[in-house]
Image (cartoon, rainbow, N blue to C red):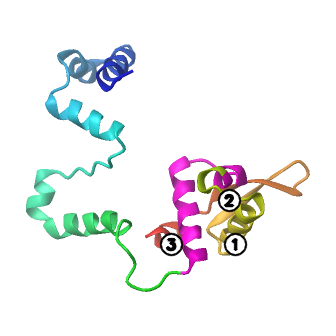
Amino acid sequence: MNVNEAHETYIRSHLGKRSGERRGRLVRGHGHGEVLFAKLHAMGYQVISFAYDDIEQRSELCISLLRMVLARYQASKTPVQRARLAEKEVLRLAVQIAEPIRPKDVEQHFDIDHRTAVMILKKLCSKGLLMPSFRGKGKRIVKYALAGESLLENID
C-alpha cells in the first residue's frame, strides 16, 4: 500500500468516528500541508510544529526546544562510556515502545544476548530509571516500566 492509499484508508476510517467541524474538515479534504505531513511522518521524519505567534513573540523558547531535539543527533563533546550509551539507548527504546519493555525487546533491537540485556535493564532499575514488573509470586521479573520524572534528565 502506498502513501496515498494509506491516507485514503485513514480518512475513510476516521469519517465515521468524527462529528461537527472535525468531520467537516475531513470531508472537505486535506490540503497540501496535511498530505505532506503524512508523507514525512510515514518516512520516519520527526515533525516539530510551532505556532507563528510563538516564533514571533517567544523565539528564544523555540530555539531552545529545537536545540533539545537536535542535541540527541550531535556527537558528545566528552568521551562517553559504552555502558552509559547503551543505557541511554535502552531508555529511548522504552520511550518509543511506550509500554513496559521486556529483555527480549532489548535483545532483538540491539542484537545482544539475553544476559547483557538483563544486565542493562537491572542497572537502569538500580539507578531508579526503570521499575521491575513481576510475574507469579513476585519472584520473576518479566518486564520493566519507565520510572517517570528523572527519566527526561537522563535521555538528553
Expressed as whole percent of the image width and height from the top left, the position of residue 19 reads 31, 18
Disc 3: CA contacts within 10 A as few (<14), some (14-19) or many (>=20) = few
Q: Amino acid at mark 1?
A: Lys
- Decide which of 15, 39 is in the foreground and name it: 39
Q: Is residue 104 left or right of residue 57?
A: right
Q: Amino acid at mark 3?
A: Asn
- Residue 88 belongs to magenta span: yes
For the stretch drawn in magenta, what is the main secondary structure? helix
- Residue at which label 3 appears: 154
Give the vertical position of 88 relative to 52 (above or below).
below
Give the vertical position of 95 relative to 68 (above or below).
above
3 or 2: mark nearer the eye: 2
- Residue at which label 1 appears: 123
Question: Residue at the location (47% across, 85% down)?
Answer: 79
Question: Residue at the location (89% across, 57% down)?
Answer: 139
SS of the residue under disc 3: helix
**Residue 72 is at least partly visible in this image:** yes
Magenta residues? 81-107
SS of the residue under disc 2: loop
**Circle number at residue 112:** 2
Disc 2: CA contacts within 10 A as few (<14), some (14-19) or many (>=20) = few
Q: Quadrant of residue 70?
A: bottom left
Give the vertical position of 96 relative to 13 (above or below).
below
- Decide which of 136, 10 is in the foreground and name it: 10
Q: Amino acid at mark 2?
A: Ile
Question: Residue at the location (70% across, 61% down)?
Answer: 117
- Decide which of 44, 150 is in the foreground and name it: 44
